[in-house]
Amino acid sequence: MLKIDNLHAAVDGKAILNGLNLEVKDGEVHAIMGPNGSGKSTLAQVLAGRDTFQVTGGAVDWDGTDLLALPAEERARAGLFLAFQYPVEIPGVSNAYFLKAAVNAIRRHRGLPEYDAMDFLSRVKAEMKAVGMREEFLYRSVNEGFSGGEKKRNEVLQMALLEPKLAVLDETDSGLDIDALRIVAEGVNRLRSPERSMIVITHYQRLLDYIVPDQVHVLSHGRIVRSGGRELALELEEHGYGWIDAGAKAAPATGATGG
Amino acid sequence: MNAPLSPPSAATRADALGAFLEQDYTAGFETRLETDTVPKGLSEDTIRLISARKGEPDWLLDWRLEAYRRWLTMTPPTWAAVSFPPIDFQDIVYYSAPKSKKDGPKSLDEVDPELLRTFEKLGVPLHERARLAGVAVDAVFDSVSVATTFQKELGEHGIVFCSFSEAVKTHPELVRQYLGTVVPPGDNFYAALNSAVFSDGSFVFIPKGVKCPMELSTYFRINARDTGQFERTLIVAEEGASVSYLEGCTAPMRDENQLHAAVVELIALDDAKIKYSTVQNWYPGDKDGKGGIYNFVTKRGDCRGARSRISWTQVETGSAITWKYPSVILRGDDSVGDFHSVALTNNLQQADTGTKMIHMGRNTRSTILSKGISAGRGSNTFRGMVRVTPRAEGARNYTQCDSLLIGDRCAAHTFPTIEVRHPSARVEHEATTSRIGEDQLFYAMQRGISAEDAVSMIVNGFCREVFKELPMEFAVEAQKLLGVSLEGSVG
């Protein structure tokens, strides 16, 4: 179980998360919605351990481990996966090489034998088929020259290969047309299991037509201001984020000073 | 994306890389041996002494003295983008050799076991049993060659592969015919110095029509303190002959700078092919730029015959300062010249390297592929010249020059010069500069890959086109070397 307790974070001295609380039980899918600048992506990056963000208060407990004490690569090896909003291009490094290095780093950590080239290829080809990626993408440089949809599929492919315990999907739907969205969502749904939790960050309700969450949270000014079931997403769709911002501004900014 | 780095995060990432990057220069040990060393300083007497020690014929002594007199009139070049305090040429030992019972060892059994251990430690076993499969090695320690393997096997093909000193004794006519014909003694300051005081190096002669059945290689080791290494290598491939040759270099870690001023001459006659690969790992100095080798080298190939081909491949990771421009004179019609280079500078290393392709024959072709990697406060300069002379109808050149920056305190410069004097020439130049970004490292780390593995993955990807030009065994070696050389590179 993931338990985020009163989390504060800043970038370049500017506070972004102001006392965020969240619990995600094993096997649950939580959606986090919120207007631009509410701290959605910051939450994703902080959970993944990006050190351009400074944690200024609070704690994150993950199955009894102090998540914030682990460096990024150890979080990944322990089973935390972040699907990037903007997957990064790495020219000169083939996707196959990168994926194999990642899978084997994680298998090593789990005490499993590393894949050799043959094992890896048969595994990766099967997974690529499932997300509708052509084999040629194995031999191209990581994300280089990929279209938006291809990049997002590559993220889902990596998620499938790395078999995370906790997957954070940061606006995986952004920039996708409806067909690509469906394929990506199917990929995510296939990976739902009682042992795997997911945090799905999105600006729009439409992704939640395909990935049905157990809970929906609304983030505003770095705090969760409302939580509810799927109907909350529909409510947002209907009324927009305006009422939330208005409410958050009216409330005393306890989060900013607490912690 | 690309959020500006705040100081604490930059520090953390540097720490993350720290463990990997603090890897030591593994070749930095010193071998304790009794040596035969001439006193410091340079004069005609020093040269006479070196020549006498080697039992050289008079013509060679005269050649050396002539070069010395030329050198006295010359001044060190100042055009390169490198800086260092003036060298005191009187404070250098010009000849140092491990003491042996006789003039030189005649077989491996006579080589000091301590020397054999030294080369074994460097991964260059000279023993019969442990020899690198399919690679003949000439091992040069300070000023002399201590052993050359597979000489007998090569001799059966008429191939001469031996130390330069030995060649002067056994094949004086060949040495005399070709020595200084590609790099004349007065070519430049350091070439003149080398011509005056050169001590040893390798000599290769591949007779007409013979394809050398194995890789030839020379391993250069500087050991003695205050000693300069001035080796001279001469490779001649007669009509239709071909050879692949590789050199490797290391030196102990010392606080003082040591000078290495070599000259390499390659001569390819009609239809001959010479492939010359270098993996240069001289001691680069410490993190603060203390110590390290000054690698001031003149390397030039002469495609003297029609349809001949000379390829230079270099991986330059060591040395405090590298100043070298392996070049090809494309004299024969339809001859081909290649230059493939990876040059890495980290900490305070400086490299000013590149090539010259001089097109003189008709339909001559050349390719230049340069990959410069700058890390730490390293400075990396590519300097290239492509010259198409009025006779060189149909000449073609393609140049690609890529720079990779790691961190934000390093520098990369590119100085291409193109001189075309024939209207039919086609000369292309492409250049790129990229940087290993924090976002790339984080992306890899988020997939469980350590920052150090991510850096070496990206660097190796960047260098792949050059590495594939290296002989197989050495490509792996070069990859490892690059990893080790990226000490403290991100910050």
Image: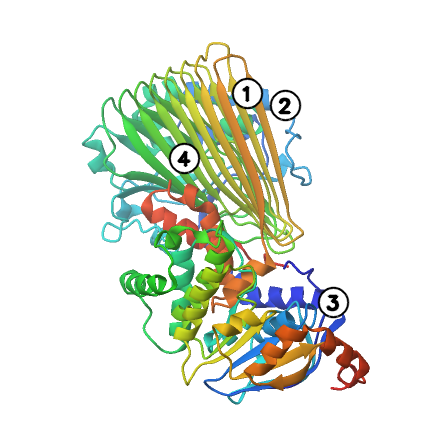
Residue type pointed to by label 3: Asp
Nearest to the observer: residue B218 or residue B302: B302
Q: Are marks 1 and 2 in contact (CB under 8 Å)?
A: yes
Q: Are marks 4 and 3 in contact (CB under 8 Å)?
A: no
Label 1 in the same subunit as label 2: yes
Name the mark nearer the viewer: 4 or 3.
3
Q: Are marks 3 and 1 in contact (CB under 8 Å)?
A: no
In 3D space, how far apart are the residues under numbered discs 1 and 2 (Cα atoms)?
A: 9 Å
Which residue is painted at 55% across and 20% down in the image? B186
Q: Which residue is mark 2?
A: B74
Q: Secondary structure at mark 1?
A: loop
Q: Reading the chain from its start, which is encountered first: label 2 or label 4? A: 2
Q: Secondary structure at mark 4?
A: loop
In 3D space, how far apart are the residues under numbered discs 4 and 3 (Cα atoms)?
A: 57 Å
Q: Which mark is residue A12?
A: 3
Which residue is painted at 33% across and 21% down in the image? B174
- B406 in relation to A66, above or below: above
- In this view, which residue lies farthest toward the bottom? A64
Nearest to the observer: residue A135 or residue B179: A135
- Residue B45, position in %: x, y? 54, 28
Q: Reading the chain from its start, which is encountered first: label 1 or label 2? A: 2
At label 2, counting other C-alpha atoms closer than 10 Å, the crowd grade (few under 14, some 14-19, many 20 or more) is some
Residue type pointed to by label 1: Gly
Q: Quadrant of residue B10?
A: bottom right
In 3D space, how far apart are the residues under numbered discs 3 and 1 (Cα atoms)?
A: 59 Å
Q: Which residue is mark 4?
A: B201
- A90 in relation to B97, above or below: below
Q: Which residue is mark 1?
A: B186
Label 3 in the same subunit as label 1: no
